[in-house]
Image (tube, grey):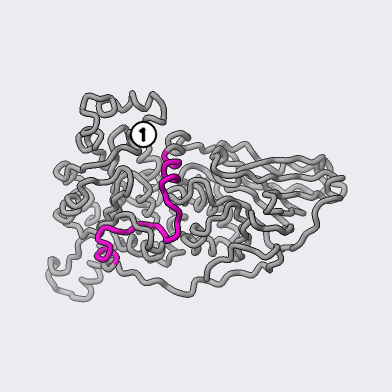
Amino acid sequence: MFIDTEEDGGHKNDKPNKTEEEHIQDDAHRIGKNNQSEAKLEKTGQPAANDASDRMEEELIRQEIDQGSNKNDTIMEPAATAPRKPICDLSDPRYDICEISGDARTMGANRTVLYVPPVGELGSDGQEWSIRDQSRKHLEFVNKVTVKSLNASQSLAAPECTSRHAVRALVFAMNGLTSNPWHDFSDVLIPLFITTRALEGEVQFLVSDLQPWFVDKYRLVLKNLSRYDIIDFNQDGGVRCYPHVTVGLRSHRDLGIDPARAPRNYTMLDFRLYIREIYRLPSAGVSIPYKEANSNAAAAAPGAPAEQLQRKPRLMLINRGRTRKFVNFPEIVGAVQKAGFEVIPIEPRRDLSVEDFARTVDSCDVLMGAHGAGLTNFFFLRTNAVMLQVVPWGHMEHPSMAFYGGPAKEMRLRDVEYSIADVESTLYDKYGKDNPVVSDPESIHKQGWQLGMRYYWIEQDIRLNVTRFAPTLQKVLQMIRE
């Protein structure tokens, strides 16, 4: 059953949703063969990714990779008669957050949340903040929500509640750079996990700029983090009253969690295991598929020659659709097969459910692709599986490690990176070996992020030298067999 995304005038009761009742079965061979290089973690009805992808590239290059701070996220509740600390905290370099405890009233159609202080509260002179209710405070694509702390005279004229709720609420945005899987996780799902996981479902989501495709695509995660109907904040004409409202999402860094700042010291490993649990993938103690399959085969046929029982390691090879794609994809598939892997080739496609694709990724020992959003599927890999990242030309090692390699290691995956040579980039053919774009990437980066984005993120495709790449495949094969 899908989550309701609209309310009729704000009078619907807070009824917990039912749990998912149907288990979508996976058939890795079916998906691999039927697609013949056509699949991706996308859902029918998702908007075209072109604009969002372009914005993503600009955002990733322009902003600092890691903007973590040592701020303590614990919310202290003062006594009712004491002067209140500011409701909104704007000190973190990544996000703004507002915590309203007591008489909190939301007016979604006005994008406003009110705090009505009790009579006699000291220091209630009235204040107002305007913040972006997502995890990137400087992202202009996210509209702002106004938070007001009313003074005594304003409180007398405060709008009356049209519905009262015993559960707390969270106001956050689903737009921005979403529609790209990396941003879906980095900007919304991980911050949502940090902000609400410890509440164990006892929170209602009031979503500004609600995206129906996002609710549909990640419905299992959203339904687990909240037991209550999702409210389309922008379309909500009522005045909802809650005992506590949070506006905004906490975020520690790009695609990351700082355990020292997270409730219950959550880690990225905790998040990966949580995602696997949500999608009903095998538990943490299960071996990678290659070892599990061969162990089961040996147990079923004791005494049989090992060569008769040995299943090949399975490698999912992801090709990008628009930029940094493999122009010799069939040749790469053949080389990976020759190295001793079973290959599941994947190319962009929008009609596979997350549930189906998660089970296909789980069946693989290796996830391989060029630096880009397709590698975000590493959340569905098993512990000790390998992420094999092909790093494009242009001093791309740092973002490749920061956005994928580092998180992979934190989640107990094994990270292997292959940096292409200049001649393996289509920039070599286009500009020639003596052009600074090829011969001196650092000089290009020094001229500003726009040029780096243009050449190394957008214009570049990859023609992998399968001979040069062969030792890397053998290294991965050895890691899988250890």
Dot 1: within a 10 Å radius of its alpha carbon, few (fewer than 14), some, or many (20 or more) residues? few
Q: Position of residue 408 (x, y in %)?
A: 37, 48
Can residue 207 be seen at all in this image of the molecule?
yes
**49 or 279, which lies in front?**
49
Q: How many numbered circles are shown?
A: 1
Quarter of the view holding residue 169: bottom right
Residue 126 location, quadrant: top right
Choose between 420 and 330: the one closer to the eye.
330
Left or right: 50 in relation to 417:
right
Tell me where the magenta segment starts and ends, as one range: 31-57
- Residue in view at x 33 percent, y 63 percent: 360
Residue of label 1: 454
Q: Position of residue 359 (x, y in %)?
A: 36, 64
Residue at 71 percent across and 44 percent down: it is 87
Which image quadrant: the C terminus?
A: bottom left
Residue located 55% across and 61% down the image: 225
- In the rendered view, would you say 449 is above or below 224? above
Whether residue 382 is in magenta: the answer is no
Q: Is residue 478 visible?
A: no
Disc 1 marks which amino acid? Answer: Arg
User: In the rendered view, does 399 fall on the left or right side of 171?
Assistant: left
Secondary structure of the residue carrying numbered label 1? helix
Q: Is residue 159 left or right of residue 435?
A: right
